[in-house]
Image (cartoon, rainbow, N blue to C red):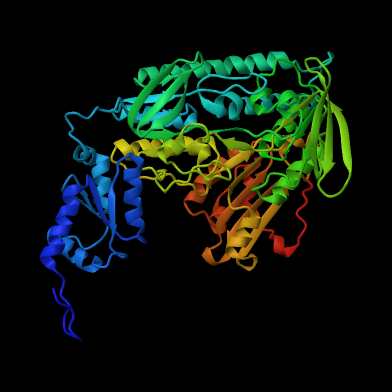
Amino acid sequence: MSPPPPHQTQLPDWDGLKLRVRTLIGSHRVMIFSKSYCPYCNKVKELFRSLGVEYYALELDVTADGPSIQQVLVELTNQRTVPNVFVNGRHVGGCDSTFQAYQNGSLQKLLGDSKDAEPYEYDLIIIGGGSGGLACSKEAAVLGKKVMVLDYVVPTPLGTSWGLGGTCVNVGCIPKKLMHQAALLGQALQDSRKYGWQYEEQVKHNWEIMVEAIQNYISSLNWGYRVSLREKSVTYLNSYGEFVEPHKIKATNRKGQVTYHTAETFVLATGERPRYLGIPGAKEYCITSDDLFSLPYCPGKTLVVGASYVALECAGFLAGLGLDVTVMVRSILLRGFDQEMAEKVGAHMETHGVKFIRKFVPSQVEKLEEGMPGRLKVTAKSTEGPEVFEGEYNTVLIAIGRDACTRNIGLETIGVKINEKNGKVPVNDEEQTNVPYVYAIGDILDGKLELTPVAIQAGKLLARRLYGGSSTKCDYINVPTTVFTPLEYGSCGLAEERAIEEYGKQNLEVFHNLFWPLEWTIPERDNNTCYAKIICSKHDNNRVIGFHVLGPNAGEVTQGFAAAIKCGLTKELLDETIGIHPTCAEVFTTMDITKSSGQDISQRGC
């Protein structure tokens, strides 16, 4: 064919283009008409990759006849956008239509002869039997789905393991709060003399009796979870789950026996485990919170390494039980929490016997003597100079943070992306990973809160969205929490530092006050130690964007106010609320001193 005359545009060979498009559609199992820069096109490609399905993509933005091919597609499908997806010659549609077809199963039928395709063994498999995984599994089962839960505890270097229920029940919130209570009872015994209680015998604490009672209670919870799963017809395997191919996992039990299972959908709920120091003697001689709560002997003189809430909570109740406790801190206390409150927590612990070694990190732990407990030598280096510290302890407890359990479960095999820095899983606002049939909840989520009630809520809501027709998503904003140090610290909303970053100091008003619990006045202890603070946004009707309280029963106080904050609590509403007298919580209804005023907030009486 001769070229067109000068200044004359050659018209597309429409018949040739239509034949080309039909040939592409007919000769590829999955044909995607795409554009290389389009995020929706990439999302569809990711879906087929996660399913292990090969596809052919024609990038219209880098193809000479791209615009003309797109016009042919408009005539053929009445769809003007990309991606334009065809499976085995049939038009599926764009991104939304493709994902909808995947969710309702029609895409899988199009991909192969549904009569020959092997059905999945389960509707849902959850890897991880902690709070979030159990909540999700039971909700899905109630909604009529066939569900399996895999839960396996890799023993600690000291050999500690536990039953069904995850960190919170076995080595977290539950035993922590009970040991905290044991320490508070010791303080109450001291206070009781001032209230007229007289007792002659020497009061001492028995570690073994406490641990046995706590472990018996935890065992009852473990059994209760297994019964609950059985009642809801959820299959439970005490096995380690690992992906071996799309929609398929390998489950290995303690005896090394292997089984394979398939499911349409998977939820990752593997949680986290304590991080160890990368120094000589750390794994050989040190313990973590995974070991502490079932330790068969009293830990004796203890060095707690770290400044996390786990570190300070453990140091607090150990000291409250009468032990000699030192906390070694690399930088700041309670990173991520309000730093004014964190320093007040530390100051109170120091006045009650906990010693702090600041700006030091351990470099070596050596065993000096066998025993239960034995004797250890700790060498530490300053973070600010050449100074070296050496000390002897019976027990060294490491609490420097936790790592997500995501690196050894085969996620790379099916293409699930993780944050390589911390092992956490990025998800969208529906807890969906980059692989459409895999979701994640709980502590392993990147950028989300590591709290048991959050995992439970997310798990329930996810099951309802997947199987119950719900659209409600988990709200990660204004989640209340409490640090159970000897003087409890409850918070909801923003730390003061974060509020200043987001709103600007000039746009905030901070109200605060010290208070003295009535119960502490008779023993005459800890006046001007308890502290309350609210952070308000001036230009939003003084809405409360940060709530902080340091005092007894801070968790109980914070929980109630958290509901009000969800409803848009303002300073005016607090002022209009009549307090319950005499309580600690009433301080929030009478606060009239701002930080900016510089007025004295010291208390002299009830």
Q: Describe residue 231's horizontal placement relative to residue 549 as left or right.
A: left
User: Which residue lies most toward the front here?
Assistant: 2
Q: Residue at x 23, y 67 (%)?
A: 65
> Can you see residue 463?
yes
**In the displayed structure, would residue 595 be above or below residue 316?**
below
**In the displayed structure, would residue 16 be above or below residue 129?**
below
User: Which residue lies most toward the bottom here?
Assistant: 7
Q: Residue at x 43, y 36 (%)?
A: 413
> In which quadrant is the C terminus drawn?
top right
Across and down, in percent, residue 361 comes to 79, 40
> Can you see residue 194?
no
Residue placed most toward the observer, 453 or 423? 423
Q: Quadrant of residue 120?
A: top left
Q: Residue at x 76, y 28 (%)?
A: 281
Q: Describe residue 587's horizontal placement relative to residue 240 as left or right.
A: right
Across and down, in percent, residue 343 comes to 75, 47
Across and down, in percent, residue 497 comes to 65, 57
Q: Residue at x 69, y 34 (%)?
A: 399
Q: Quadrant of residue 488?
A: top right
